[in-house]
Every structure is written in C-alpha cells, then in structure tokens.
Image: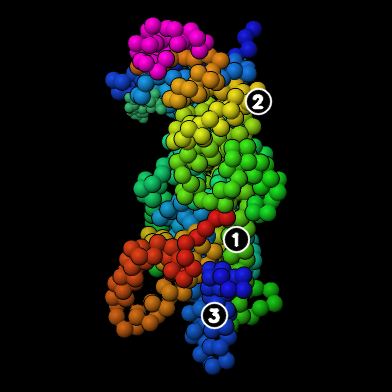
Amino acid sequence: MTDAILELTDIRKSFGALKATDGVSLDLRVGEIHALIGPNGAGKSTLIHQISGSLKPDSGSIRFQGQDMAGLDMAARARRGLGRSFQISSLAPEFSALRNVMLAVQARQGSSFRFFRPVAGDRSLTEPAMAMLERVGLQDRARVPAAELSHGERRQLEVAIALALGPKAFLLDEPMAGLGPDGSKRLTGFLDALRSEAPILLVEHDMDAVFALADRISVLVYGSIIATGTVDEIRANPEVRRAYLGDAA
Amino acid sequence: MMAGLSREKTANIVLALLLLGVPLAAVAAGEPFYVTLATRIVILALAAIGLNIALGLGGLVSFGHAAFFGLGGYVAGILATHAFNGETVLFGLPSTTSMPVIWLVAVVLCGLVALPIGAISLRTSGVYFIMITLAFAQMIYYFAVSWPDYGGEDGLSLYVRNTFPGVNTAQPLPYFLVCLGVLAAAVCLFWLLRGSRFGAALEAARQNTTRLSAVGIAPFNIKLVAFVISAMVTGLAGALFADLNRFVSPSMASWQMSGELIVLIILGGKGRLFGPIAGAIVYVLFEFALGGITERWQFFLGLMLLGVVLFARGGLLGLVAGRARHD
Ligand SMILES: Nc1ncnc2c1ncn2[C@@H]1O[C@H](COP(=O)(O)OP(=O)(O)O)[C@@H](O)[C@H]1O
Ligand SMILES: [Mg+2]
C-alpha cells in the first residue's frame, strides 16, 4: 500500500530521433510538493503533457488514484481531478479573467449542456470564480480580457483556473515564470498552503521557490530522471550539481 | 453609450425597426414587391443566423450549410407536392401543406443529417473542416440533381404556398410577418445560447480548445451539438425560402449558396446578434440595386467584402459599434 496518488512507470516518448522522455518513473504522494527540475529542453513540459493527456506516451503507464489513464483524453483526465496550468499560458483570450475562471467552475459543476439560463448573473458561477481570483490576488483585474493581462497575471489566472477545478492533484508548469520577485514570493507562500488541499507536481526554474517548497525533488536531464530526493539530498548530489545546478546550490 | 444603450444595441434596434417598418410602408404605398424583397432578406438572415451559431460562436467555418438550406427547401417542396396530388410521401407517410408541420420535419431531418456530417467533419479542423463540409454538401447537391422524381436539375415547383393557421400566406405581407416572427425567435435563440453555459463553452472552444479540455469539457461534444443546432436553424430557413419562391432547386444546396451564407456573416459581423441581419440587408439590396444595372454586381460585392475584411474585421456592425467585448 502506497500513498501515491499519481504513479508514472517507465514513460517513454520520442519526437523522431529525440528521446524527450526516456524511461521516466516517478510518483506524487498525498500532501506533498514534488518539484521537477532540469535544464531547458530536458522534457519537463513534455512529461506534464503526457500526464494531463495532451500528448500520448509511446510506452509506459500512468496511474492516477489507482486508475490507468491510458485511453482517457485530456478532458476526461481533468474531470477525474488532474488540474494543470500551462507553461505557455493557454487561456480564452477574449474572455475576461472572471469568465475564464467561470468556465472552470461550470465544468466542475458538470453542466455545460445548459442552453438558456444566462451565465452573466449566475451567482453559482460568479461567486466561486471571484473567490478564486481573490485567492491568487487577481480580483481587481476580473473584468479585463485575458489577452490584455500581463504575462505574470496570466500565470496567476492559470493557477486560479486550476484551483477552481478543485482537483485531486495539481500539475503546475512554471507558474512563477514572469512574476517578478514579489509575485514569486506571494505565490510561493500560496503554494505552500495549497499542498494540504491537493499534492502538487511542480515544474519550476526558480530555485529559491523550489528549495523553499519541495518535499521531494526529481531532476530530469535529457528525458531521464538522474536523481530523486529531499532538498538536502539533491543539493548535495554531485551528479546533479554537475549536470544542472552549477553554482545555484 | 447614451442612455445606457450601447451603440450595438442601438444599431440592432434601428435594424429591427427598418425590417418591420419598410415593408409596412411599402404595402401602404402600394408597392408589394418590396415586401417580397424584405422577406428574402429575412429568410437569408435566418439561414445565416443558423450558420452564425457554428461559425460565429464556435469558429466552425462550415462551407456546407447550403446542404441544410436545400434539405429544408426540399422538405417543403416534397411534402407540398404530394399533398397537392393527394398522395402520401415515402413509406406511406402523410403529406401536408401545413407550415408548422413542414418546419418540424425540416428541422428534425436537418438535425439528423447534421449529426453524422458533424461527427465526421469535426474530426478535422481548419481548412480540412472547410473542405469536408463542402464535400458532404456537394454529395447532397448531386443527389438532388440526379433524383428525377423531384425535378432533378430543373427543380420542383410548389403550386400554392403552404398554409399557416390563421394567416393568408398567399399575400406577401402576412407571409412576411410569419417569416419575421420566425426570425425574431431565432434571434432570441441565438441570444440565449450565446449567454448560456453552453455558449460559454462554445465560445471557449473557438478561442482555445486546449483550454476547454484542460477544465474537463470535451470540445468535440460541444461543437457537435452546436453544429446540429446550427444546421436545424438553417434548414428551417430553407423551408421558408421554398415557400417564398414557391420553387425548390438543387441550387439551394450549391456551394455558391454556402459561400453566400458565409459572406452574409462576415459582412454583417460574425458572432454578433444582428450580424446576419445587417449582412442580409446589405447583400439583398446590393443584388437588387446593382443587379438591375449590371450582371457584374457580385464584383462590387466582392470589393465591399474586401474592404470589410481588410478594414473592419467586426463587419459592418463592428464598424458602427466597435469591438465586441465580453464582460
Ligand atoms: N511537439 C514536439 N515535437 C518535436 N519536438 C518537441 C515537441 N515538444 C517538445 N519537443 C522537444 O522535446 C524536448 C523537450 O522539450 P520540453 O518538454 O518543452 O522541455 P522543458 O519543458 O524541460 O524545457 C525539446 O528538445 C523540445 O524541442
Ligand atoms: Mg517547459
């Protein structure tokens, strides 16, 4: 019996000759933040895509809450509780920030085939959506179209949308990117508390944030995990220092 | 922004008043021809409102919606012809000249036909979607051409206009009002759909299907339902069009017709409530005013379309009302 909610076993994915994911096994446990770090092009986003269902692995298995995810598309996985954010913001650009979150709220309520009642004044949508925006500190920008938000604000909106889904696990792909030092600090505090709601698989370049937050860290290089361990273990690992951390540690 | 009315709403009200007022004035002035012209506008606008659900809200550029327009037309033509001859239709089903029954049959049939067409076409996107919807429409077009029982290439005439309870449909003005009523209902339907949860999902599908999937809504299902509803509305317009002209022919299902519907939407403003109406007014008036002078009126229409696409992406309504905004 393990308390892993998400388990990857020997995932492989090639783009032509490039092995973007080369036999990755890892798990995400209840209550933890598991950080996935590695140099640019290591295959971190590719791995997140395969977990969330936007890419199909060539081989290997992904189990979420004990259930095999093979054959489930992205929407089906999201409904089962995999909430993701995108490295490159993926929003409905013409919708306001609030509308973007409302879409997630309505999806969570499982009710998109309602044809007549207007959403605009529907407080069962607007109130939870607004609450999520407040949690990420975006409430003042609720009415602004997503396309007009700053890069950092879009990252926050991504997180608010993932929150609104009430997921069983979060997959966050570089949520700090573009936030600036204050924003990163706030989001770090926020994610710290979030892990008790649902565990987080966190891809992040900001090493301060990773070292502050992670219960465990996995280091991905050229599609393979070269080490998994606690913050101290990873900092001390000579192979990791050579391959990735350089003087950051 | 005056008196709390946005410019788009003001423009919509003006269009609605024109659409009702001009035919009434024409009758008063003893010029019933203009009523027929207005009816043509109303029916084409209705067909385009149908397409606007798929194209404007869902971003689904169907280049085959004339198939549903034609199908609706043939439902009216076939049911009425058999009724006139005192016969039953296929398999002994009763024929009828009652418009409400014809409309119901047209709408249901178009929905049933759109379901497999949509399910197959929606496996593709972009230019492939355009081509595959065109291919399906061409199949239906050639089916109509090669079916001699119903006139084949020559089409099918309706001896008298079909009936509507309590209305003398043979008169231009009452028939116009019937069509206008249907158009008003379709405008309401579009407005409700756009504002609903379904509409939110559909508009999200247009903007970013990945986003929709990521929150757990399957874009395919949303788009398919939109495609089917869209086809049903366009099919209803086809039935009305057959009765207006008392004639149906395969040309109603031609690719030119599909293109015309797209043009109406782009001209008027895609995704906008009154976009198809504005587009249809301009299109039919162009056809009428210039068609009498030169065979090449479509050239001028093309120029105008070019202008809209280059300088007014929001269509003519966009020009008046500015960019569409979601709250
Ligand atoms: N769809 C794709 N087709 C081909 N190559 C890809 C594709 N997606 C990613 N790659 C390549 O796979 C490698 C891993 O990319 P990615 O997962 O984005 O890395 P990371 O997120 O760790 O920076 C890179 O070399 C990238 O160029
Ligand atoms: Mg990446």
Identified at 42% across, 7% down, the residue is A237
Tag shown at residue A197: 2
Instruction: Check disc 1 and report its element: helix, strand or loop.
Output: helix
Q: Which residue is mark 3?
A: B18
Q: Secondary structure at mark 3?
A: helix
Task: In the displayed orientation, state which residue is furthest to the bottom.
Answer: B29
- A29 to B34, vertically: above or below: above
The quarter of the image holding the C terminus of chain A is top left
Residue under pointer 1: B191
First to last magenta residue range: A223-249
Which amino acid, mark 2? Answer: Glu
Against A35, residue B319 (above or below) is below
Q: Dot 3: few (<14), some (14–19), or many (≥20) neighbours within 10 Å?
A: some
The reply to whether the magenta stretch includes residue B26 is no
The quadrant of the picture showing ligand 2 is top left
Which is in the foreground here, disc 2 or disc 1?
2
What residue appears at the point 53 percent right and 70 percent down from the top-left corner? B7
Q: Position of residue A217 (x, y in %)?
A: 49, 15
Q: Nearer the viewer, mark 2 or mark 3?
A: 2
Badge 2 crowding class, 10 Å Cα cut-off, few under 14, some 14 to 19, many 20 or more, is some
* Residue B36: % across, % down: 50, 80
